Every structure is written in structure tokens, then in C-alpha cells.
Image: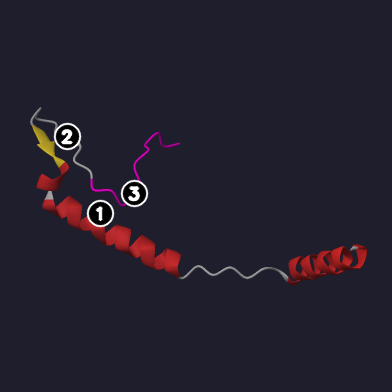
């Protein structure tokens, strides 16, 4: 479970320590930033294709409930 409160789309500037002990910043690593941006766009495209279609039984239950509440009033 993530403990971060920042949204995914927020650019970050986290410091990273490499094995040699040298500290670098994420934006300095262009290849990683490009891959991250590509994956982010790919995720957004996938999310844009998700469509919600309720089951027939759910729709029937909703309409039955609406009809019953109209009769009671």
C-alpha cells in the first residue's frame, strides 16, 4: 500500500543514491523520465477505454424500486 499523498501526474524531484554513492535527481535521468511518461500515457489511454455497462438485473432492480416508490407516494 502506498503512503504517498501526491497524485501520479505530479512531477517529482526525488533524490536517488546510486550504488557508487553519488546522489542524482530523477529529472537528470532522461531515459527513465521518457519511459515513465510513455507508461503514464499508455495507462491514461487504457483508462479512457474503460466503459461501464450495468447488468440487466441491476437495471431491472433500479426500475422496480422506482416504480414501487412512485406507487407509495
Residue under numbered circle 2: 15
Q: Is 24 covered by the magenta stretch? A: no
Q: Earlier in the sequence, mark 2 or mark 1?
A: 2
Q: In this image, 1 relative to 37: left or right?
A: right
The answer to whether marks 2 and 1 mark residues whose Cβ atoms lie closer than 8 Å is: no
Q: Earlier in the sequence, mark 3 or mark 2?
A: 3
Q: Looking at the rendering, in which quadrant would you find the C terminus?
A: bottom right
Q: Residue 23, which numbered label?
A: none
The crowd level at tag 3 (other Cα within 10 Å; few <14, some 14-19, many 20+) is few
Task: Identify the element where label 1 is drawn.
Answer: helix
Which residue is nearer to you in this view: 17 or 48?
A: 48
Which residue extends farthest top?
A: 21
Stretch of the chain drawn in magenta: 1-11
Residue under numbered circle 3: 8
Q: Compared with residue 7, is residue 15 higher up or lower down, i.e. above or below?
A: above
Q: Position of residue 12 (x, y in %)?
A: 23, 43
Q: In this image, 12 relative to 67: left or right?
A: left
Seen at 19% across and 52% down, the residue is 33
Seen at 75% across and 70% down, the residue is 59
Which residue extends farthest right?
A: 72
Q: Position of residue 35 (x, y in %)?
A: 22, 56
Amino acid at each position: 500500500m502506498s503512503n504517498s499523498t501526491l497524485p501520479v501526474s505530479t512531477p517529482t524531484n526525488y533524490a536517488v543514491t546510486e550504488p557508487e554513492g553519488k546522489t542524482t535527481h530523477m529529472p537528470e535521468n532522461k531515459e527513465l523520465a521518457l519511459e515513465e511518461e510513455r507508461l503514464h500515457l499508455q495507462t491514461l489511454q487504457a483508462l479512457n477505454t474503460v466503459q461501464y455497462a450495468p447488468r440487466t438485473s441491476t437495471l431491472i432492480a433500479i426500475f422496480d424500486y422506482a416504480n414501487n416508490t412512485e406507487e407509495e407516494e
